[in-house]
Amino acid sequence: MPDSLVEILAATGNTHKVVEMRAILEPHGIQLLSAKDVGGIPDVVEDGDTFTANAVKKATEVAKALGRTVVADDSGLEVFALDGAPGIYSARYACEGGNDGRNVDKLLAEMQGVADRSARFVCVIALANPGGLIGTAEGEVRGRIIDAPRGDGGFGYDPVFAPDGYDQTFAELPAEIKNGMSHRGNALLQAVNQSLFAKLF
């Protein structure tokens, strides 16, 4: 771990994401700031047609607006039997405002009677400063959609996603185990391995 911490702003209003990202990045010398820490962040319209496009747009626009180094992610669930849905629309699958419970309910309704339950979570990380994009990294984790929600941890689709090799869902697994295999954890570690963050020290 470096001798000093580098501060980076997380371009998200999702406190669950911030908690996960902090736990993953801090051992690598990255101190993650939340929107609350800086008095809020500008809204960015996520109108890209890929996870990468949305992550890059969030990172670059927030970095330019606030004059800070920013890390953003765009992530979602892809269910193979649903042709990759909900995909980039994961957070607003059931309604534009976004609601975890309704999103899960819609997914399970669409999966009724479907034999192939295989799915993957995908995450793209984008790192930017006021001068522009520094780089991106992608991670994924594969698993299956179970029949009914289980567990009180996590957020989003975690209660219905069981990663390969586990009977428990992401919402049932301890945070340190989930973070060690999750799509977000894999993307952040890929960014570390690509030395994206090293450019900040």
Image (spheres, rainbow, N blue to C red):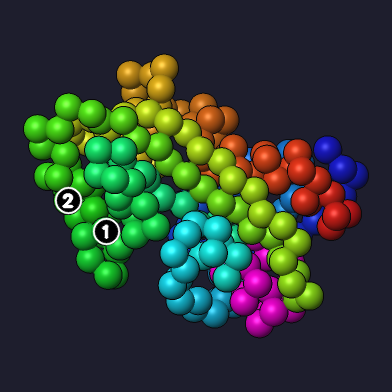
Was residue 118 drawn as part of the magenta stretch in this picture?
A: no
Work out which residue is located at the far front of the displayed protein and give it: 83
User: Please, is residue 160 above or below residue 51 in the view?
Assistant: above
In magenta, the rendered stretch is 58-71
Decide if residue 107 is on the left or right side of residue 199: left
Decide if residue 51 is on the left or right side of residue 81: right
The main secondary structure of the magenta stretch is helix
Badge 1 density bin: few <14, some 14–19, many ≥20, Cα 10 Å: many
Q: Position of residue 83 (x, y in %)?
A: 29, 45
Was residue 67 drawn as part of the magenta stretch in this picture?
A: yes
Instruction: Check contact, mark 1 vs mark 2: CB within 8 A.
Output: yes
Badge 2 density bin: few <14, some 14–19, many ≥20, Cα 10 Å: some
User: Dividing the image into 4 quarters, which one contains the C terminus?
Assistant: bottom right
User: Please, is residue 23 above or below residue 96 in the view?
Assistant: above
User: Dividing the image into 4 quarters, which one contains the N terminus?
Assistant: top right
Q: Position of residue 187 (x, y in %)?
A: 60, 43
Q: Position of residue 96 (x, y in %)?
A: 27, 70
Residue at the image point whose x is 69% and y is 79% from the top: 64
Work out which residue is located at the far bottom of the displayed protein and give it: 65
Residue at the image point whose x is 39% and y is 19% from the top: 166
Amino acid type assigned to the residue bearing label 1 in the image: Tyr
Residue at the image point whose x is 87% and y is 43% from the top: 2
Q: CA distance from mark 1 to mark 2?
A: 8 Å
Residue at image mark 2: 106
Amino acid type assigned to the residue bearing label 2 in the image: Lys
Q: Is residue 176 visible?
A: no
Residue at image mark 1: 93
Work out which residue is located at the far left of the displayed protein and give it: 113
Residue at the image point whose x is 15% and y is 33% from the top: 114
Q: Position of residue 186 (x, y in %)?
A: 59, 37
Decide if residue 157 is on the left or right side of residue 66: left
Which numbered tag is attached to residue 13?
A: none
